[in-house]
Image (cartoon, helix red, strand yellow):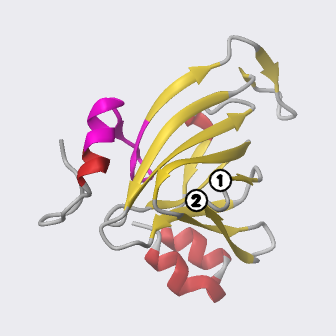
Amino acid sequence: MRFGGEGSRVHPEAQRLIAAHRLQAHPEGGWYRETYRSAERVTTSRGTVRSATTSIYFLLTAEVFSAFHRLSSDETWHFYRGDPVTIEVIDASGAHGTRLVGADAPQTTIAAGAHFAAHVDAPDGYAFVGCDVAPGFEFAEFHLTTRSMLTAAYPHLGPLIARYTR
């Protein structure tokens, strides 16, 4: 199991959580495992049928960030343990804001359609969180943002975009 870049040291508790909760690599970065998918189905305003809600465990480390992406649904983050997570949010107008989720701010919601990335700033740190998506998450509606596309749309945020895209 890979725990970051070559030569990186990942917090032992992060390694334990990845193994204990059988987390797998996520395409955006970090590790996850789906823990709940509602049997209740809903039809979205776009006409797609999806689970009413889904939940995952998600883990980030100081070495591995969650790259800019967007979802077609709202996503609520819940802090469980570790270090605070900074979530960089770019709304449709190009306004940039940050959200912090941690012990002092244990929950935040990212609105559908926003581009967002997340990172742990504490050296050698980690964060173990949960994410709920409603209507439920489907990889078909997950959009991992490319650096060129996002920079073309929001050139004033070039350095931020370069830092949190691959």
Residue displayed at 65% across by 53% down:
106
Asked if residue 93 lies in the magenta stretch, the reply is: no
Say which residue label 1 marks.
Answer: 106
User: Where's the C terminus, which quadrant?
Assistant: bottom left
Q: Which mark is residue 144?
A: none
Residue displayed at 78% across by 66% down:
92
Q: Position of residue 86 (x, y in %)?
A: 56, 67
Q: Is residue 31 above or below residue 33?
A: below
Tell me if label 1 and label 2 are in contact, CB under 8 Å.
yes
Q: Secondary structure at mark 1?
A: loop
Q: Is residue 99 above or below residue 76?
A: below
Q: Position of residue 131 (x, y in %)?
A: 60, 41
Q: Which residue is at the far right?
A: 45
Residue extent of the magenta highlight = 16-32
Quadrant in the picture for residue 64: bottom left
Q: Secondary structure at mark 2?
A: loop
Residue type pointed to by label 2? Gly
Q: Position of residue 99 (x, y in %)?
A: 67, 67
Pick the residue in front: 4 or 145.
4
Q: Is residue 166 left or right of residue 67?
A: left
Badge 2 density bin: few <14, some 14–19, many ≥20, Cα 10 Å: many
Q: How many marks?
A: 2
Residue displayed at 77% across by 53% down:
111
User: Where's the N terminus, which quadrant?
Assistant: top left
Asked if residue 26 lies in the magenta stretch, the reply is: yes
Pick the residue in front: 105 or 63.
105
Residue displayed at 67% across by 60% down:
105
Q: Which mark is residue 102?
A: 2
Residue type pointed to by label 1? Pro
Measure the C-alpha gap from mark 1 to mark 2.
5 Å
